[in-house]
Image (cartoon, rainbow, N blue to C red):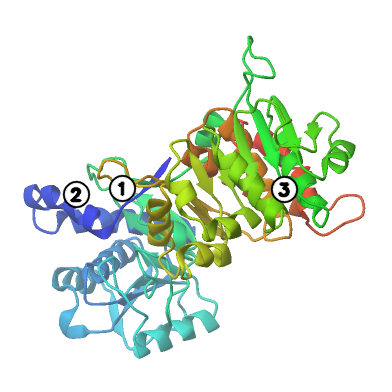
């Protein structure tokens, strides 16, 4: 599990070390780790050209000390001082003693640029001079290594509201920050500088975490103990939503899937293992309900939503059911059983009364608190937020897809079916949503990489057929 810390949490963890270590020792520790990461990026240090672009804060000091280490190993090191009067004094002195040169612009023989303009305490876009410099660096195709975060990107939201650095690699210290999951940071390397950090409430799953949570039948399990997923989806207008949602629940290894709705015949024709009925009341016993994909927003759709929410079972509310729910938010707030809401940005705006904005983590948390439900806010970085409990902020799981192959019609129906299956298997709501999002993104990537016999474009149907392959890949020792 990766944990993400705010700038205040990092500073609080640094304070004891700053008090007990000699002056400047913590910065030099960080800068040495930065220099080693840059050396790996370069491959060969001796004879290569490195230019540090230096701001006025500690990140500028990190960049100067790292450039000093590289200069001592034989690199041609230069530095552009954006604010010479406020450059880190000790770092600049060491850089000059090592033979580093101060220049006005990035030299032509530069192989790599170090972005040491601003750090985790700064906000806002690059100033004009720095923006012009990095535009030139980008036009010349020189790779950039950012110190802590690419300058001009918000550390909390990952948003870039104007000119910003585009980095091939970001090297950060002590602990990851939200920007490293939410923003465009290139590859991210974490340097251990000895901070004592607790587990954070903002985190992301890795393959090992997903593998540990994905249900695997035991020797004494049967189809009922593995989880029975109920699906209320589809309509005469949108039978495909029922087929996709139900198929994803089957692929996610539910012990049994029960479908109720007007698309019963179509569902069984695709998935004969599904128990399908036209009536919700005749569906039989389930352990979680999925309601919403393709049900419409008429009386029949509303009846399906009320039926699911009136149970004491976990319920995932998606698609059309979210539109219905937006007009009746109190029905979820009264529930004691887990509820998961899965809006995209437009559905979020209907539920919250405004778009999520740049602070997607904060927006998801507020909506989760307002409804007393777990919220999965869809996007290239999926945000899953639990509601606050007993005065403590709820857990947040971030899932960075790394690509947009899942952004295709019907893909959300698959995600709902997968989450429903994991809820039925007994996973807590945020873990069920985060685990499903991870596998969903991996399946989309596999579908895109596998052109199939007719080289068809990626579609929800093709993603569905890669869900089990994604799980198998994740469960390998080194996926």
The residues bearing labels 2 and 1 have C-alpha atoms spaced at a distance of: 20 Å
For the point 46% across and 68% down, the residue is 353
Mark whose residue sits in front, 2 or 1:
1
Quarter of the figure with the C terminus: top right
Upstream in sequence: badge 2 or badge 3: 2
* Vertical placement of residue 105 versus 211, above or below: below
Q: Which residue is mark 1?
A: 393
The residues bearing labels 1 and 3 have C-alpha atoms spaced at a distance of: 35 Å
Side of 245 relative to 122 (left or right): right
Q: Which residue is mark 2?
A: 13
The residues bearing labels 2 and 3 have C-alpha atoms spaced at a distance of: 40 Å
Q: Which residue is mark 3?
A: 446
For the point 48% across and 38% down, the residue is 338
Q: Secondary structure at mark 2?
A: helix
Side of 198 relative to 415 (left or right): left
Residue 134 lies, in percent from the top left, at 43, 82
Upstream in sequence: badge 1 or badge 3: 1
Side of 460 relative to 433 (left or right): right
Residue 232 lies, in percent from the top left, at 70, 42
For the point 70% across and 37% down, the residue is 249
- Residue 246 visible within the image: yes
* Vertical placement of residue 427 versus 89, above or below: above
Residue extending furthest toward the front: 299
Callout 2: 10 Å neighbours few (<14), some, many (20+)?
some
Residue 461 lies, in percent from the top left, at 80, 49
* Vertical placement of residue 53 versus 36, above or below: below
Callout 3: 10 Å neighbours few (<14), some, many (20+)?
many
């Amino acid at each position: 599990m990766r944990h993400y810390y705010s700038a205040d949490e990092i500073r609080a963890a640094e304070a004891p070390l700053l008090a007990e270590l000699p002056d400047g020792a913590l910065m030099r520790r960080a800068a040495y780790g930065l220099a080693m990461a840059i050396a790996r990026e370069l491959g060969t240090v001796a004879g290569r050209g490195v230019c540090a672009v230096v701001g006025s804060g500690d990140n500028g000091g990190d960049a100067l000390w790292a450039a000093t280490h590289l200069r001592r190993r034989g690199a041609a090191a230069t530095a552009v001082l954006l604010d010479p009067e406020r450059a880190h004094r000790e770092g600049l002195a060491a850089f000059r003693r090592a033979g580093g040169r101060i220049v006005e612009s990035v030299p032509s023989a530069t192989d790599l640029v170090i972005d040491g303009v601003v750090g985790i305490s700064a906000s806002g876009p690059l100033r004009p001079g720095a923006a012009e410099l990095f535009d030139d660096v980008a036009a010349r195709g020189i790779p950039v290594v950012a110190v802590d975060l690419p300058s001009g990107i918000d550390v909390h939201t990952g948003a870039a509201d104007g000119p910003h650095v585009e980095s091939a690699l970001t090297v950060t210290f002590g602990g990851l920050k939200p920007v490293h999951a939410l923003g465009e940071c290139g590859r991210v390397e974490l340097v251990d500088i000895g901070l004592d950090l607790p587990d954070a409430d903002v985190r992301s799953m890795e393959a090992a975490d997903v593998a540990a949570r994905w249900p695997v039948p035991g020797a004494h399990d049967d189809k009922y103990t593995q989880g029975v997923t109920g699906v209320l989806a589809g309509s005469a207008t949108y039978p495909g939503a029922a087929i996709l949602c139900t198929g994803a629940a089957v692929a996610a290894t539910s012990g049994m899937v029960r479908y109720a709705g007007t698309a019963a015949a179509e569902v069984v024709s695709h998935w004969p293992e599904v128990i399908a009925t036209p009536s919700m009341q005749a569906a039989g016993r389930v352990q979680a309900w999925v309601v919403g994909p393709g049900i419409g927003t008429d009386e029949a759709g509303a009846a399906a939503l009320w039926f699911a929410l009136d149970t004491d079972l976990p319920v995932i509310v998606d698609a059309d059911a979210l539109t219905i729910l937006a007009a009746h938010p109190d029905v979820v707030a009264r529930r004691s059983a887990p509820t998961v809401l899965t809006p995209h940005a437009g559905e979020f705006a209907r539920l919250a009364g405004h778009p999520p904005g740049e602070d997607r983590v904060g927006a998801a948390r507020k909506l989760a608190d307002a409804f007393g439900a777990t919220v999965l806010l869809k996007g290239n970085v999926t945000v899953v937020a639990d509601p606050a409990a007993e005065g403590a902020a709820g857990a947040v799981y971030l899932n960075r897809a790394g690509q947009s192959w899942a952004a295709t019609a019907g893909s959300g129906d698959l995600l709902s079916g997968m989450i429903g299956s994991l809820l039925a298997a007994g996973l807590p709501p945020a873990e069920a949503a985060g685990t499903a999002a991870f596998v969903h993104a991996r399946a989309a990537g596999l579908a895109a990489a596998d052109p199939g016999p007719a080289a068809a474009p990626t579609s929800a149907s093709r993603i569905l057929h890669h869900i089990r392959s994604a799980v198998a890949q994740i469960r390998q020792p080194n996926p």
